[in-house]
Amino acid sequence: MIVPVFNSAATLEACIGSIDANTYPDDCMRVFLIDKGSKDQSLSIFTCCQRKFPGLRKDLRRFYVSQWWVVLLLPLFNLITFFIRFAGIINSLGMTGVWKTCGLAKEWADFGQAFRKEFVEVGKPIVRLRLWANAEAVDQKEAL
């Protein structure tokens, strides 16, 4: 549901209240309030309505509750990030500060070369399998 909000401070609270009071299932509905430069107090009324009608944010709360495990991984992520940055700082201490860049054409050529190299490595088992299967087919034809 998209609700256009432009200088509608007088009716915004009643509108949000009626959306909150409906009987349509909350998990089947999303509400978007779009405001483009209201000159009245629409934004402050909307902020107050968020506190007054917490039922409108049930899906957002449900999402954050389902992602509880991320909170447990954040300290580990921060620790790993710290050590990667620390290793980069230690490695750069003995170097002179030079910004080494190359053009887009060189970057694209390097990417293509690295991709082809990796593709050849991945393709080797497929080539071996194809040769093995073809060798069996040739052996079967010769047996006939």
Image (cartoon, grey):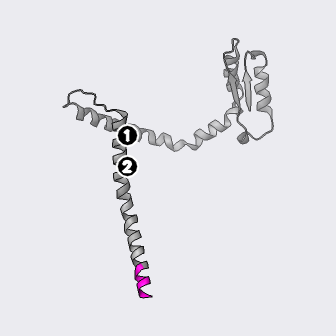
Image quadrant in which the N terminus is located: top right
Magenta range is: 138-144
Residue hosting label 1: 108
Q: Return the x and y of residue 106 as percentages of the image width and height.
A: 33, 37
Res. 137 image quadrant: bottom left
Residue lying at the far bottom in this picture: please name it.
Answer: 144
Question: Looking at the picture, which amino acid does disc 2 mark?
Answer: Phe
Q: Are marks 2 and 1 in contact (CB under 8 Å)?
A: no
Disc 2 from disc 1: Cα separation: 10 Å
Image quadrant in which the C terminus is located: bottom left
Res. 7 image quadrant: top right
Q: Return the x and y of residue 51 as percentages of the image width and height.
A: 67, 25
- Looking at the image, residue 143 sits to the left or right of residue 11; the answer is left
Element marked by disc 2: helix
Question: Looking at the picture, which amino acid does disc 1 mark?
Answer: Trp
Residue hosting label 2: 115
Residue in front for this viewpoint, 81 or 96: 96
